[in-house]
């Protein structure tokens, strides 16, 4: 799909299809009004007959209107003007895409200025529409022997704006929206690959290929012996039961001067989480191929950053391994020594994400980061806390937490902060080691307690943790990766560039 911006008068465009809103009660948008006048009241006649009132969700497709150069006109009912919420706008756009796709229009022009969404500007609307169109046409059928053909007639989607000034803003938004959508697509494609194929080596190979394709990106892959030499006993304890070798992948993007401190992303890359010897029950194991969504996210963010040529230094660190049970696997009550020197009593081998992230966070110290943000499908409890709408945010730095929250609202890929108070830290006291990986006695608050565990390994830099166990994948009857929180993190980077 090709997205672009045009400035000019919408009613004068020779195109396959023009999209304009109509509001309640029977209020035509400025462009609809002009078309109405030029066409001897075609629209107001229909409105009078009751075919269209402007109710939210109503759609009416008109063809071959006299005095109007476009082949088709799609009138979209938007309800009360200035009352549309963002979720309503999203549902409306999905419905509109389905309607468009049923016509034979290769090209559609969308009157972006005439669609009003509460507290949202053109730039937001454009970025979101591009992402939603990508979502609507997304399929993952690499592993189907017979691919169902997708009806995808629409080729060009054009946002029309009245002035040159609007044009510049809109063009930037298109560029950002396309970059984000591409990042999301890469993330989904990686995350959806089955765990017999998407192994730590598979991710390492993807990283190497990624670096080869992009001159500004360097890659380094640490093997188990390298990790052992660094003292990463915590990370290595998780891979013990697997036949696949663990990898610690680092991708470095240099978009700024050498001396500019990098932003470091750390993505949890468990390619399958059985729970290890603290094995999961079968229904809980379904979906655990998605335990590398954090890793997939950092790939997507880098892809978007490259497309946008962001003037920042970004490093992505991916600790990757598989969590399997068996005679070689870690037992509950084993004690291991992490790279930081802290000893950890592993009371539950299913709390493995924090174990690999602990050493990955310590490893980040060498980059003298400006900020470290980890992304992890860390706790099932995050779904209980926040449902599927906001990712969990925990941080040791108020400014960073604020910036991420803001980026969440700007991108509609929202986060909500949870506290990391001392009381919660107390839950991780161990009788025999420096800390335990889970509380001996459950206090609840599992998302927060996991965050507290990570915080112990992130004391040397501003750090934020995103628990995306509730947002990285779909729920219910439809399975699949969502590509979250790529949009959030790209927005965070874009906002940082604005502040430069
Ligand atoms: N990968 C899981 C978390 C998860 C659960 C992600 C459901 C997505 C959906 C993680 O490794 C895990 O097993 N966490 C445990 C922690 C517990 C043992 C303290 C959990 O959430 O139950
Ligand atoms: Mn687990
Ligand atoms: Zn896990």
Image (spheres, rainbow, N blue to C red):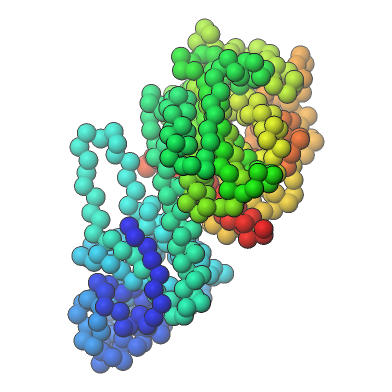
Say if 5 sits above or below 467 in the image.
Answer: below
Q: Image quadrant for the N terminus?
A: bottom left
Towards the viewer: 457 or 118: 457
Asked whether, in this view, residue 274 is left or right of residue 106, the answer is right
Q: Is residue 279 left or right of residue 151?
A: right
* Count of residue discs: 0
Residue at image coords 73%, 23%: 340
Work out whether residue 343 or residue 247 is closer to the camera in this orientation and state it. 247
Residue 93 position, x and y percent, is: 39, 63
Residue 424: percent from the left, percent from the top? Answer: 75, 34
Residue 342 visible in the picture: yes
Give how far across and how far down residue 291 sits, in percent. 50, 32
Q: Quadrant of residue 289?
A: top left
- Residue at figure coordinates x 75%, y 16% from the top left: 433
Residue 54 visible within the image? no
Give the residue at x 63% y 60%: 498
Instruction: Name the residue at 67% across, 17% down.
Output: 231
Percent coordinates x, y for residue 238 in the rendering: 57, 19
Q: Would you place residue 155 above or below residue 340 in this image?
A: below
Q: As drawn, is 182 to the left or to the right of 41?
A: right
Front residue of this view, candidates 255 and 342 = 255
Extreme right residue here?
422
**Which quadrant: the C terminus?**
bottom right
């Amino acid at each position: 799909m090709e997205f672009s911006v045009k400035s000019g008068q919408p009613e004068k465009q020779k195109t396959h299809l023009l999209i304009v809103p109509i509001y309640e009660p029977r209020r035509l948008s400025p462009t609809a009004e002009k078309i109405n006048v030029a066409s001897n009241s075609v629209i107001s006649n229909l409105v009078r007959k009751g075919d269209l009132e402007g109710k939210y969700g109503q759609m009416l497709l008109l063809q071959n209107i006299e005095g109007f150069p476009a082949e088709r006109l799609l009138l979209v009912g938007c309800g009360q003007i200035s009352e549309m919420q963002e979720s309503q706008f999203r549902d409306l756009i999905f419905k509109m895409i389905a309607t468009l796709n049923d016509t034979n229009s290769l090209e559609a022009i969308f009157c972006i200025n005439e669609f009003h969404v509460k507290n949202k500007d053109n730039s937001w609307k454009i970025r979101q529409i591009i992402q939603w169109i990508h979502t609507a046409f997304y399929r993952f059928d690499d592993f189907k022997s017979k691919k169902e053909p997708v009806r995808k007639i629409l080729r060009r989607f054009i946002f029309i704006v009245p002035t040159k000034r609007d044009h510049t803003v809109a063009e930037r938004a298109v560029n950002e929206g396309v970059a984000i959508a591409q990042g999301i697509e890469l993330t989904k494609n990686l995350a959806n690959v089955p765990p017999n194929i998407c192994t730590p080596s598979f991710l390492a190979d993807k990283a190497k290929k990624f670096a080869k394709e992009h001159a500004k990106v360097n890659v380094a892959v640490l093997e188990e012996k390298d990790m052992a030499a660094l003292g990463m006993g915590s990370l290595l304890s998780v891979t013990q039961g697997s036949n696949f070798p663990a990898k610690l992948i680092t991708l470095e993007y240099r978009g700024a001067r050498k001396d500019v401190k990098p932003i470091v992303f750390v993505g949890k890359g468990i390619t399958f989480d059985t729970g290890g010897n603290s094995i999961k029950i079968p229904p809980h194991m379904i979906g655990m191929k998605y335990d590398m969504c954090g890793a997939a996210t950092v790939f997507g963010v880098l892809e978007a950053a490259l497309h946008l040529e962001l003037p920042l230094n970004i490093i992505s660190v991916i600790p990757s391994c598989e969590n399997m049970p068996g005679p070689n696997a870690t037992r509950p009550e084993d004690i291991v020594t992490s790279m930081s020197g802290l000893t950890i009593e592993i009371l539950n081998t299913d709390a493995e994400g924090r174990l690999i992230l602990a050493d990955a966070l310590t490893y980040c110290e060498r980059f003298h980061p400006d900020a470290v943000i980890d992304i992890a499908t860390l706790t099932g409890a995050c779904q209980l806390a926040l449902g599927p709408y906001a990712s969990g945010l925990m941080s040791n730095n108020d400014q960073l937490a604020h910036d991420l929250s803001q980026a969440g609202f700007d991108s509609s890929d929202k986060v909500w902060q949870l506290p990391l108070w001392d009381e919660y830290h107390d839950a991780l006291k161990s009788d025999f080691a420096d800390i335990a990986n889970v509380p001996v006695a459950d206090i609840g608050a599992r998302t927060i307690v996991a965050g507290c565990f990570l915080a112990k390994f992130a004391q040397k830099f501003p750090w934020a943790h995103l628990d995306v166990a509730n947002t990285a994948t779909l729920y219910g009857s439809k399975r699949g990766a969502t590509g979250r929180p790529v949009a959030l993190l790209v927005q965070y980077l874009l906002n940082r560039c604005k502040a430069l």
